[in-house]
Image (spheres, helix red, strand yellow):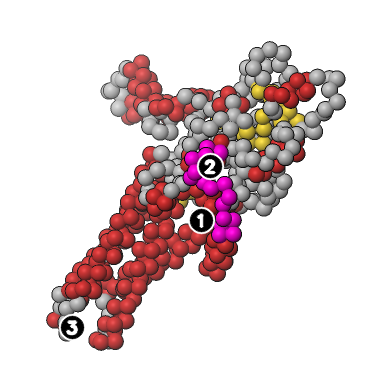
Amino acid sequence: MASPAAQKRVNVAVSRLIPPVLLGAVVYASYAVTKPLCIDYLIHPLPSYHRIPRVGAGAAILTVYYVLLIPMVVTYLHLYYHVLWNPGYLPLGEQKLQDDESNENEKKSKKSHRRRHRRSARKADQEKTTQSETDVERGLGPVSGGVEASPELDLESFYTKDVFVCQEDGRPLWCSTCGQYKTDRAHHCRELGRCVRKMDHFCPWVGGVVSETSFKFFIQFVVYTCIYCTFALIVSAYFTAEIRRNTGGANAYWCVCIGLSALFAFFTAGMTLSSLQMGIFNITTIENLNRRTAVWTLAIRVPEYLLDRLWDTQSPWAPTFRMVSYPPETSTPSQPQATNPSAGERHVFAILHTLPGENPFDLGSPFKNLQQVMGRSVLDWLLPIKQSPCADHSSMESHYALGPVVTRLKQEAGLVPPGNGAVSDPHIRGVASEGKIPIDDSRNISRALYSVLCLVHWITI
């Protein structure tokens, strides 16, 4: 049995090999449809077929085929680019970077020592070697160099938000492997050894990890691929049946095209339904594993008008929740303490829990949830240009848009005036004010769409 490290290397190697294989399959299918089918059989039939030219049919098939091929290829290239160059990694911690650099320098030092031992005649300058190794390590690209080399996810990037996912003691989630705090919904990818923002899954078909920066393009790709493969399957199967009736034979190119298009059509259809289901629930594939039992722990800011009541021992109002105060008194970033600061700006948070199966990021409408992934206009849904709205973390409310579950938690804890059911999330309020998301959404249509997708997904399984 292979070791976990070896298995990871195999997974990464396979993810690098599959995209060229897919490209080869597309090139083969394009040749099979263009030359043997449209040109040699329909437009200029070979003498062996004994058929009259059908130029209109051949031209129509070629036009539709390449109209479907272009968006599939464009979305895949856009998806592949983001998977490789903008995967949504969280920065590594400073200690992790130093440890990795020391280990790498130690390996290089041992390798250099063995080389010098074998070639005793060569004498290298130790100071120059050390400096060179350090420079090489610091320039390794997106994993340990450049902007991500600085630990930018300090506590302040969390407690300046109004809501963030935390541990029981109020600290943000911590990744011991990366030596860094994890933002909301971030997950550590074992294959790549990095924490990824809103990671959905590691997909060898697209060369890496699908996350918030690429999930929209992934959905577009599987949808366009499903339509493209279905068309290629229908055309190849129809003319294969026709030539078999007339001559009793078959074209090998068309038969291979039938097999490839059928395989990828059914595969991408399942991926389309699964991905749309994730978007409708506003969850990731990883979060879906325990969706019905998961309990989220949230740090929710206590409004300023309640702070005096919290620290007043004579107040009859007593909170029913645990609290944590930032910034912590200690300078250790991993040990924030619940304190009562007497001076300076106070960031006091209530530690609240959702019920099992509740999703604080569910916006209450399948349509609004899909908009967080696909965008807020028809062009955003169709074209692989803009990133998902959920990839924008500029809001001071939270890292991701929050739904009715958080509003209910605030009301139950007394953190908002009773009866205030207005949408408090700026992610949603700002869009609603622009008229892009109607407040009175058609919930019946959304529920009907969700029911149909679930039914089709259940039938295909």
Mark 3 nearby-residue class (10 Å; few <14, some 14–19, many ≥20): few
Instruction: Indicate left or right for 369 with 111 as reference.
Output: right
Q: Secondary structure at mark 3?
A: loop
Q: Residue at x 75, y 20 (%)?
A: 308
Distance between mark 2 and mark 1 Cα atoms: 23 Å
Distance between mark 1 and mark 3 Cα atoms: 45 Å
Say which label, 2 or 1, has the lower sequence index.
1
* Magenta stretch: includes residue 441: yes
Q: What residue type is disc 2 on?
A: Ala
Q: Which residue is mark 1?
A: 276
Q: Are marks 1 and 3 in contact (CB under 8 Å)?
A: no
Q: Residue at x 53, y 67 (%)?
A: 456
Q: Can I make out residue 373 in this image? A: no
Mark 1 nearby-residue class (10 Å; few <14, some 14–19, many ≥20): some
Q: Is residue 304 above or below residue 265?
A: above
The quarter of the displayed image where residue 37 is located: bottom left
Q: Residue at x 53, y 48 (%)?
A: 438
Tally the marks.
3
Q: Secondary structure at mark 2?
A: helix
Instruction: Indicate left or right for 78 with 212 as reference.
Output: left
Q: What residue type is disc 3 on?
A: Arg
Say which label, 1 or 3, has the lower sequence index.
3
- Residue 371 position, x and y percent, is 50, 48
Q: What residue type is disc 1 on?
A: Leu
Q: Which residue is mark 3?
A: 51
Residue 432, label in figure? 2
Mark 2 nearby-residue class (10 Å; few <14, some 14–19, many ≥20): some
Q: Give the number of the mark in front: 2 or 3.
A: 2
Residues in magenta, as a range:
429-446
Nearest the viewer among 75 and 174 is 75
Instruction: Indicate left or right for 103 with 121 as reference.
Output: right
Nearest the viewer among 98 and 326 is 326
